Image: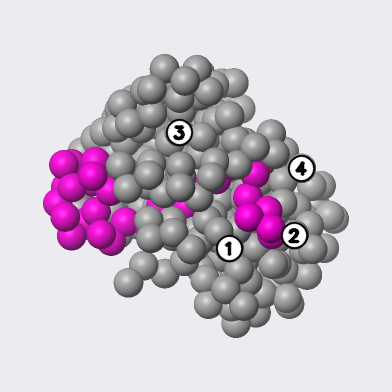
Amino acid sequence: MRTPYIAGNWKMHMNRADARALAMELRDKLSGVSPRVMVAPPFTSIETVATVLQGSNIMTGAQNMAPAASGAHTGEISPLMLKDAGASVVILGHSERRHSYGEHDQLINEKVHLALEEKLEVILCVGETLAEREADRVAKVVRTQLAGGLKGVTTEQLQNVTIAYEPVWAIGTGRTATPDDADAVHAEIRRVFTDLYDAAQAEKIVIQYGGSVKPDNVKGLMGRDNIDGALVGGASLKTDSFVPIVQFDT
Ligand code: PGA
């Protein structure tokens, strides 16, 4: 049985005061819910949010990290710093990192390894662009991103990995993949896991869907066999929308 897992990606929003206020509301309103819940504030608010959420059922995450533990990496943040600030999870390979900042599978793979070595949980994002979808290349793109991002990751390490399928054309656009479309790609991702690992790992791996998840479409998505959670951007910035998404099954 896979436990549902809902994560909020706050992207480049929220100063520390706003982040503290939102974290306090979420802590109170989501106390005792059954899905796993994580929120990923910007780096500058991680400590603030982690302090509020300490001892609660909500994990604090980061949206990215450097592929190095320390050293001369101007402008970067290391996994040790993330842990020191209170994060226990890191989102890696988000499409905004891939497409706006040129991150490629090899770099993402280095980050995945370092995060897992440092005992951070990883959410590894994969997903195709509109042009790739229209060219019928979804399966190939997702397979390449998974094989590249997970290269050398052991079965044991996989216990700390979640996959987020986020079609680029659905992120922040209000266009959601239909539950059928998303479920088909999630099923493909399980086939890739069977090939890269084995059937047991394919059955176990938690796969979130991301891309314009809202209170009114979450139920349809979560009702599908292969969809185990959501990585939520815009709708994670307000309790009015994030709380009902987390409580999709009530
Ligand atoms: P969105 O973002 O929910 O605003 O589409 C999702 C994401 O980028 O993780």
| Disc 1: which residue | 219
Q: Do the numbered discs 3 and 1 sit on residues whose CB atoms are within 8 Å?
A: no
The image quadrant where one finds the N terminus is: bottom left
Picture coordinates of residue 13, whole percent (x, y):
76, 42
* Disc 4 to disc 1, C-alpha distance: 26 Å
* Disc 2 to disc 1, C-alpha distance: 13 Å
- Crowdedness near tag 2: few (<14), some (14–19) or many (≥20) residues, C-alpha within 10 Å: some
Give the number of the disc on residue 241: 2
SS state under label 1: helix
Amino acid type of the residue that numbered disc 3 sits on in the rendered structure: Gly
Q: Which mark is in front, 2 or 4?
A: 2
| Disc 3: which residue | 127
Q: Earlier in the sequence, mark 2 or mark 4?
A: 4
* Disc 4 to disc 3, C-alpha distance: 23 Å
**Residue 161 vs residue 151: left or right?**
right
The image quadrant where one finds the C terminus is: bottom right
Q: Nearer the viewer, residue 218 or 46?
A: 218
SS state under label 4: loop
